[in-house]
Every structure is written in structure tokens, then in C-alpha cells.
Image: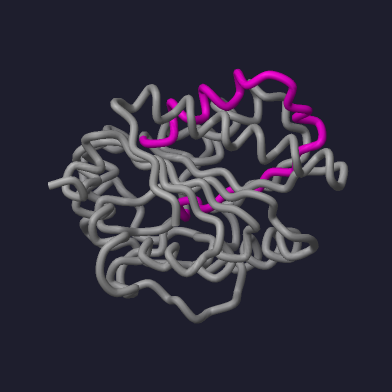
Amino acid sequence: MQIRVFEDAASLAAAAAADAAGRIRSAIAAHGLARIIAATGASQMAFLASLVREPDVDWRAVEMFHLDEYIGLPTTHPASFRKYLLERLIGPAGITRYHLLDGEGDPAAACRQVGDLVRRAPIDVAFVGIGENGHLAFNDPPADFDTTAPYIVVELDERCRKQQVGEGWFATLDDVPRTAISMSVQQILQARAIICVVPDRRKAEAVLASVVGAVDPMTPASILRRHPDVTMYLDRDSASLLES
């Protein structure tokens, strides 16, 4: 794992976006299409805003999958990840090939449908973050490190749900769905490259646990150390415990 630390979240986002855009351009040049996985959440906003401004990216040659979605949450809700991606990535970039998880219908059917599509060819680059509890996508601790299903239905733990309230997506804990569809850990690891964007002091403990010590399902993002091409982008706040 390569760890890059920047002075602030803005410079982190710009560097991660330049890296991501370069990998997309290279994939398109190599085989005419870049297949990507996009993350959501407050930590990804500046990164995606920088990414869609990167020059010379042929977004018409990009096929996008996303990591996770709440079950039972309509796309009109401010916390909907489909809404987030449509407004922050798909629309601004002009992506026409995208596969969103429908958490309002049959979750098992959504897992099968998008899972079949994601397995058709390798993913060139996955964009991920790390939760305050160390989660990777919505794989909360203890994460399933073994399943090879591309998407699974998961229960969200209380710390994860509290994070969503703390970030302002929901008014109260009771408003946060208790279940979600998530890309599995093993499917994330199938990506050729992973760019992990983690700003903010509140993520410092999770960052430390993810890069130091045992690879453990209780810190789901620690599994990233077993991937051959991961770059973790941190700011001084999120890296603060690594440097102490």
C-alpha cells in the first residue's frame, strides 16, 4: 500500500483526482473502455468535484458501478447514493454507461443484476473511502472477508449509522436505514487498482487501525493491505495518528 499525505483536504482531493483520471485515460487507451467503481459520502465530495474537472477524460468510454446503497431509501432522499452519484459524478461528467443499485425493490435481485454485470470484465480502478468504524463500502465490522458474491445485503452497525447522522444525511438515528446493499470485500479487491480517499480527523483512528497491525474483519479496510495496487490519500488530520 502506498500512503500519500497532504496538507489539507483540498490538495488531497486534487492529487487523488489526477491519479484517478490518469488511470481512466490509461485504461481507455489500452482497451477502449474504463470500468470504474465510485464511492459516495461526505469524504468523497471534493475528490469527485476535482475528478469531473480533470481534462481529456472521455467519459463516454467509462462504465461505472457503485459501491453501496441503503435499502428502502428513495432516490429523492438527500442521503440516496444514487442521487449523490447522479448529481456529483454521472451528470457533471456525462457518463452514459452506469449501473446503480436499486434499494427500493428486491435487494437480492439488485445484487444479482448488478453483480452479473460487474463480473463481465475486470474493473480498472475502484474509488473507496474508510468509515469511522473502519468499514469498506458498507461492510461493517465484523466484515465478511470470504464471500465471493459481488454484492451482498448487510446490516449496518450503530456506529456506522451514527456517522450518517453526524455528517448531516439524516436528522436522527431512527431515520437511518438498518440494512443496505454493499459490494463485497472480495469484489472490491478484484479491481486492478484501488484509490482510497480519506480526509478528516474523525477518520484518524480508522486509518491507524487499517494500516497498522493485523488484517482483521473487525477493521474491514485493513484488507486493502492485501491488494497489490492501493494508494491511500490522507490529509494531515486523517494521518495524525500515523505521525505521532
180 to the left or right of 99: left
How many numbered circles are shown? 0
Q: Is residue 205 above or below residue 17?
A: below
> Front-most of 84 and 21?
21
Q: What is the residue that sits farthest to the right in this orientation?
A: 32
Vertical position of residue 231 compared to residue 54: above or below: below
In the image shown, does 63 or 13 lie closer to the viewer?
13
Q: Residue furthest bottom?
A: 146
Q: Which residues are magenta?
A: 43-71
- Could you tell me residue 168's position as x and y percent? 27, 32
Q: Relative to 187, does residue 3 appear above or below in the rendering?
A: above
What residue is at 78 percent from the left and 60 percent from the top?
A: 121
Q: Is residue 64 above or below residue 105?
A: above
From the top left corner, tell me how far across and down residue 95 is, in percent.
73, 31
> Left or right of 122: which side holds 154?
left
| Residue pictured at 58% horizontal, 50% vertical | 126
Q: Which of 231/73 is in front?
A: 231
Task: Please state, as top left, top right, bottom left or bottom right, where the N terminus lies in the image.
Answer: bottom left
Q: Does 156 sit left or right of 183 as displayed?
A: left
Residue 243 point in image, percent of width and height:
18, 46
**Viewer-proximal residue, 240 or 158?**
240
Colour mapping: one colour
Res. 156 visible in picture: yes
Residue 61, magenta (yes or no): yes
